[in-house]
């Protein structure tokens, strides 16, 4: 006979709840954008009407809303103040251009940390270069519950 203590049962039910809730969510909408700028005038400005992208994610300064693949549960953004040239080459030329890029996080790699990247899990949450703590806190709570 298998004997489970209440802590093991609680961990199992929490894990099951997380899996069930994850499977009920719709595809995530994220802002998509990319720009290399020399002054504030070249930085991304997010429109209030949140226009949908046509033909895929935006690869330019005009941000639009892209519906991610169903397996994607994170939006990301990266903002670096300098270090790029006008063609978007890191360390190239005078390297006095900044860079902003964002979209759906489709990678299996950990989203946060690398290159000033910040990640979030709510619709249109990547309109800021500031890190979103909600994903970090949720991950810590999940790990504490499972372990």
Image (cartoon, rainbow, N blue to C red):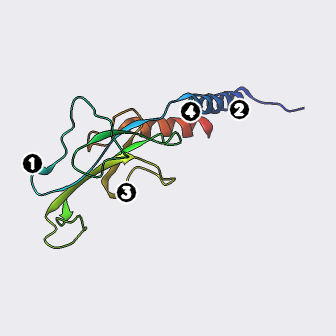
Distance Cα–Cα, label 3 vs label 2? 35 Å
| Label whose residue precedes the other's in the sequence (2 or 4) | 2
Disc 1 is placed on an element classified as: helix
| Label whose residue precedes the other's in the sequence (3 or 4) | 4
Mark 3 residue crowding within 10 angstroms, few (<14) / some (14–19) / many (20+): few
- Label for residue 114? 3
Question: Residue at image x 48%, y 35%?
Answer: 27
Disc 4 is placed on an element classified as: helix
Disc 3 is placed on an element classified as: helix
Residue 114 placement (x, y as % from top left): 37, 57
Please tell me whether residue 39 is drawn above or below residue 122 in the rendered image.
Answer: below
Distance Cα–Cα, label 1 vs label 3? 26 Å
- Label for residue 41? 1
Which residue in the structure is indicated by mark 4?
A: 22
| Label whose residue precedes the other's in the sequence (1 or 4) | 4
- Closer-to-camera residue (60/147): 60
Please tell me whether residue 112 is drawn above or below residue 134 in the rendered image.
Answer: below
Residue 53 placement (x, y as % from top left): 33, 40
- On-image quarter of the C terminus: top right
Left-right relation of 127 to 40: right
Disc 2 is placed on an element classified as: helix
Which residue in the structure is indicated by mark 2?
A: 8
Q: Closer to the observer: label 1 or label 3?
A: 1
Question: Can residue 81 be seen at all in this image of the molecule?
Answer: no
Mark 1 residue crowding within 10 angstroms, few (<14) / some (14–19) / many (20+): few
């Amino acid at each position: 006979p298998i004997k489970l203590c209440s802590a093991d049962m609680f961990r199992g039910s929490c894990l099951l709840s997380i899996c069930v809730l994850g499977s009920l969510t719709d595809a995530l909408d994220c802002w998509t954008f990319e720009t290399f700028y020399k002054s504030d005038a070249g930085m991304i400005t997010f429109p209030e009407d949140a226009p949908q992208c046509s033909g895929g994610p935006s690869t330019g300064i005009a941000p639009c809303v892209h519906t991610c693949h169903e397996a994607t549960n994170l939006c990301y953004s990266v903002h670096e103040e300098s270090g790029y040239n006008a063609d978007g080459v890191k360390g190239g030329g005078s390297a006095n251009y900044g860079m902003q890029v964002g979209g759906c996080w489709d990678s299996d790699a950990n989203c946060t940390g690398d290159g000033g990247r910040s990640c979030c899990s709510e619709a249109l949450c990547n309109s800021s270069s500031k890190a979103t703590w909600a994903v970090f806190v949720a991950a810590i709570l999940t790990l504490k519950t499972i372990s």
